[in-house]
Image (cartoon, rainbow, N blue to C red):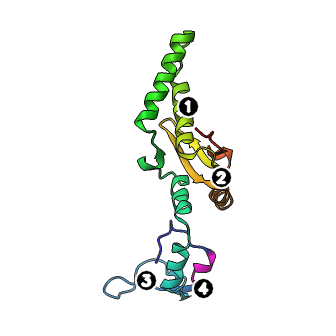
Amino acid sequence: MTDSNTELPGALLPSVEPKAVVDRADCLGRPAIGTPEIVQTPTSWPDTATVASAILQEPAFLTRARRVLSGDIRPDDYLCPPDELVREVEAHYQRVAEESGVVASDEARRRTLADWTLSHYYGGQLVLRRLTDQRVIVLAVGPNEVGAVEEVFGVDARSGFVREIPYVE
């Protein structure tokens, strides 16, 4: 049985008979005080194989996207830049400061690190990503995954996720 927060596809919901009035009773079988309880009696539940099949057929990237979009973001959902890349970004901005006297803001450094990290891992591939205060979250990679996430969840720029093809290093 599922809890009330779990959504099952329509085909997996049980068929239900009309509402029936049932008198509640306490643990000793005595009639309960108050109004009768109205319940729905399932006539058939989907078999375990049907439910398992429906759950197992969802690709892992859609399961992860569902979790992230619901707000359950975990530390491993963020794309981590390699230490070497962090050093390269710092060296780049050090050179810029020495050559032009312009000191980059923390926001500029953060965005550059996110862009370079995306290029490092996904250069030349379509991604659906969101830049956060910490790092970048990649929700889907490649046209098939991006299209599926956008279709299933209606993801667009309002969600903070945008399509991007990072440049190739």
Q: What residue is at 51 percent from the left and 68 percent from the top? A: 6
Label 2 environment density (alpha carbons within 10 Å; few <14, some 14–19, many ≥20): some
Label 4 environment density (alpha carbons within 10 Å; few <14, some 14–19, many ≥20): few
The type of residue carrying mark 2 is Val
Which circle's residue, 3 or 2, is located before the other in the chain?
3
Observer-nearest of 16 and 136: 136
Observer-nearest of 158 and 53: 53
Disc 3 designates what residue? 24
Most extreme residue toward the top is 101
Disc 1 designates what residue? 111
Most extreme residue toward the front is 169
Q: Which mark is residue 155?
A: 2
Q: Which mark is residue 15?
A: 4
Q: Position of residue 145 (x, y in %)?
A: 62, 58
Q: CA distance from mark 1 to mark 3?
A: 61 Å
Q: What residue is at 55 percent from the left and 66 percent from the top? A: 59
* Magenta span of residues: 10-16
Callout 4–callout 3 Cβ contact below 8 Å: no
Observer-nearest of 50 and 146: 146
